Every structure is written in C-alpha cells, then in structure tokens.
Amino acid sequence: MNQPAIEFRRVTKSYFRGNQEVPILRDFNLSIPAGRFLAVMGPSGSGKTTILNLVAGLDRPTSGTIHAAGVTVSQQRESELARWRARHIGFVFQFYNLIPVLTAAENVELPLLLSTLAKRERTTHVQAALGLVGLSDRLHHYPRQLSGGQEQRVGIARAIVSDPTILLADEPTGNLDRSAAEAVMALLTRLHLELKKTILMVTHDPRAADYAQEILHFDKGTVS
C-alpha cells in the first residue's frame, strides 16, 4: 500500500499566552493520498494555517506525528528540514512575497540557489516554470510592472520550479479580483491534473474551494 503524501496521526497543537494554554488542534488525524487536491476552510483561528506550517516543518506539534513526502517531519532536525523542504515543499502565499528589486525570473530562481544546479540549469528550470504559468514574456519584469494575477503566477512558478512533491497554498486567491482568482485556480488545477501534484490549500473563498477534489471544514481545531 502506498504511503500517503501527508499524514497527521493524533496531532495536538497548543500555544501559550502567558500561562494560558490555547489549543489549536486536538487529537487531529488526516491522511492525504499522493496527487490529491484538498481544500481546508474555516473561520480565522480554527487551525487552518497551522496545518500548513506543521506539514512544512515550520512549526512543531505539541504531540502526535506528522509524515509528509517520505519523512516523519515532526522528528527531523532543523538542518534536515531545510534540505527536505527545499526539495519537496512549494509555497504559494496570499500576498505573493516577491522581492521587489528582483525580476520575475530572479524571484523564481531563489529556491534553486539552495540546490547544486549550475547557473545554466537554473535558467532552464526558471524559463520552464514561467512558461508553464504563461509568463514567458515577463521574465525580466519587476513585480511593480505586473498585475496582481501575474504576481501570483510568478509566485506559483517559484513554488514549482524545484518540482516539489507537495504544494501548500495559503489563501492563494485572497488578494485577487475574481477574474485573476479564477485564472490562478485553473492553473493550480492544471498542476494537479497534469503534473499530479499533491495540493493542500487553505482558503476562505468557497469558489476557490470548489476547484479541489475534497473540502475539509475546520472549526475550533476539529473537522466538522
């Protein structure tokens, strides 16, 4: 039986405000098969973004185990996580997180600077990623010269340039108008269907969630 791309086993996550414990996830279980497109919805503070951070090893569970892309993420050292994350995790953010003084191509190239690829190979990967998102004619444009939808597509190109196992999308349409949002969701759907990417997406937008194969509704750290 194939191992799931992402698996939470009895995960609890709490934060502390002073001496007060604030539970975010409670005995949480989740299994996402490889190649699945899953959307997570719920009110602010329900634990949606916490799930993304736990999958990527940016946060640690209070208890329980998390497996993703072939490793037990919750048990890896920070140095191991950094290498694993660079190879297996692609991030898509609501506010793009592009560096304004870098061109589209330079922004997309950033994750590859952690790899052993030569400059010519990195250039080939960058051009392929920007071509895939329909921005071959915007390689040398700066973020200020792009529309919001184009900036988000650059962000997606950056997320996929290293051919990661898992894409984590945090409100990818939250800062876009309806037309640009639909274009971005169509692109994510294409990455899922054609490249077989496993996608875990947090969203408040029910129209964006409808593009996913499955929707989980979160409330107070549990699935409803």
Image (cartoon, rainbow, N blue to C red):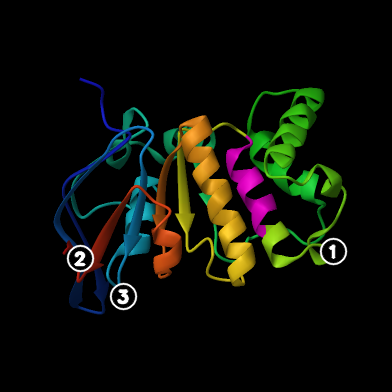
Q: Which residue is mark 3?
A: 43
- Over which residues does the magenta segment extend? 152-161
The N terminus lies in quadrant: top left
Residue at mark 1: 145
First in residue order: circle 2 vs circle 1: 1
Left or right of 36 in this view: 145: right
Sequence-wise, which precedes: disc 3 or disc 1? 3
In whole angstroms, how far apart are the C-alphas of marks 2 and 1? 40 Å
Residue for point 55% across, 51% down: 186
Residue 224 percent location from the top left of the image: 16, 64
Residue matched to label 2: 221
**Visible residue check, residue 85:** no
Within 10 Å of the Cα at label 1, are there few (<14), some (14-19), or many (20+) other Cα atoms?
some
Whether label 2 touches label 1, CB < 8 Å? no
Q: Label 1 is placed on what type of residue?
A: Gln
Check residue 183 in the rendering and tell me which mark sits there, or answer none: none
Q: Is residue 215 left or right of residue 82?
A: left
